[in-house]
Image (cartoon, rainbow, N blue to C red):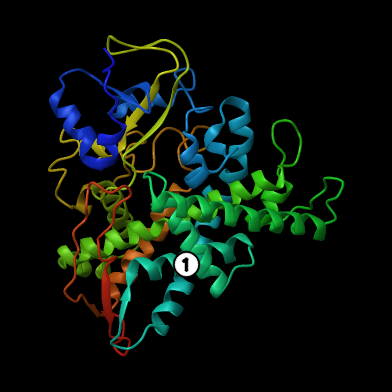
Amino acid sequence: MIPLRDSTLPLLVRGYTWLPARRRRGSGPLVRARLMGRPAVFLSGPAAVAFFYDESHVRRAGALPGPVLDTLFGRGAVHTLDGELHRARKALFTGALMDPEAVAELTAVVLRHWRRAVAGWPRGGRVVLFDEAAVVLAGAVCEWAGLPRAGRAARRTARDCVAMVDGFATAGPRHWRARRARARQERQLARTVVRARARAGAGAGRVPDGGTVLERVARHRDADGHLLEPHTAAVELLNVVRPTVALAWFVTFAAHALHRHPELRLELRAADGPGYETAFAHEVRRFYPFAPFTGGLAARDLTWHGERIAGDSMVLLDLYGQNHDPELWHEPYRFDPGRFTGRRPGRDELVPQGGGDARAGHRCPGEDIAVSVLGALSTELARLEYTVPPQDLRIPLHRIPTRPRSGFVLSVDTSAPARD
């Protein structure tokens, strides 16, 4: 039975801890609740991931609330589409974001921007890692994507993308900053798309082949055969830039893990090849809280382990809980990259950025980028000589998305050579 009392406010107040507490109080295969006035069910586990990402079970159209669209994803984004519409739009991302050469190229650009930034940090001075990582990632992804954003423009892009992610799951000033940031970036990027088409002589809908993300978005045709409207094209460009900048959360968590477990710095420094840094990146994404859950709408009346789910109900997949489930992970609240050494996590096992199939389904197409960039920057942090001054490194679980309160302040000895 769906509870009569709405749980939206308790969820906003308790954050990541709300759903695990509800699961502990229950005994069935799902958690029932009422969110934003409508019935909702929460599922968890690898079998639930497969169930959730079956389009005959759960649809995305109409599922995301307006406040989330107006901050995090954008109106008309690929995340809101199903079926052939989704597959046609997803093709825009799979080549640009999932090709191994593209992943390696972006990672190399990020490393170049990172090393240049570190060289410019004040000797013995303090920097906030979260803020600096966001600027590095914004400048790198814009260069890689063919967007004219550098210097102050890259810093403004970083600030706006951080605001979009920081304010999507809350009310009040954070949320309104997120809305303004998205609207500002969408306007600028729509003008960029129009100019790109004009330079290419695309008035009649012709855009020549090109390798940058901007060129791919400018010439992309949806399932109806038409070019994307400039606003929609801007939304999808932001859905490349914003998630890359959001890796600042994971980079800051990586620094937090290295601070708590300094012996792992030695392991990253000594690693022969990318295997250990990839395992480290997977463990950062598993251990630290990022997205609490993802959602859709029941496409019809469904049954899950004998429990009825009414059509059009909200169906939410528990990401944070699954990534800390003791039935899936030995000692889930222990940070241990060794659990991923020598093996790739199962498709529906590790789900910090969702699950399912990355090419045809709704799994984040930028997941390979996240792992590659996070692994590379984790190794850079392990090799960097710095001290961590006294600060508040607590990670508040009532705040979504969360991060260390201080943003992780460090003081770099830029005169010391990096350790191999």
**Residue ID at (45%, 69%):** 136
Q: Is residue 286 left or right of residue 155?
A: left
Above or below, 289 against 9 in this view is below
- The x, y position of residue 382, in whole percent, is 27, 70
- Tell whether 181 sits left or right of 208: left
Question: Disc 1 marks which residue?
Answer: 110
Is 123 on the left or on the right of 164, as rendered?
A: left
Image x and y of residue 343, in percent: 29, 45
Closest to the observer, 378 or 31: 31
Residue 139 appears anywhere in the view: no
Question: From what the image shows, is residue 310 above or below residue 244?
Answer: above
Residue sitting farthest toward the front: 172
Whether 311 is drawn above or below 396: the answer is above
Location of residue 12 by image quarter: top left
Residue lying at 63% horizontally and 30% vertically, measured from the top left: 85
In the image: residue 319, left or right of residue 104: left
Q: Quadrant of the C terminus?
A: bottom left
What is the three-letter code of the residue carrying label 1? Val
At mark 1, the secondary structure is helix
Question: At 31% across and 40% down in the image, what residue appears?
Answer: 292
Q: Is residue 82 above or below residue 116?
A: above
**Where residue 306 sits in the image (x, y, percent)?**
27, 9
- Quadrant housing the N terminus: top left
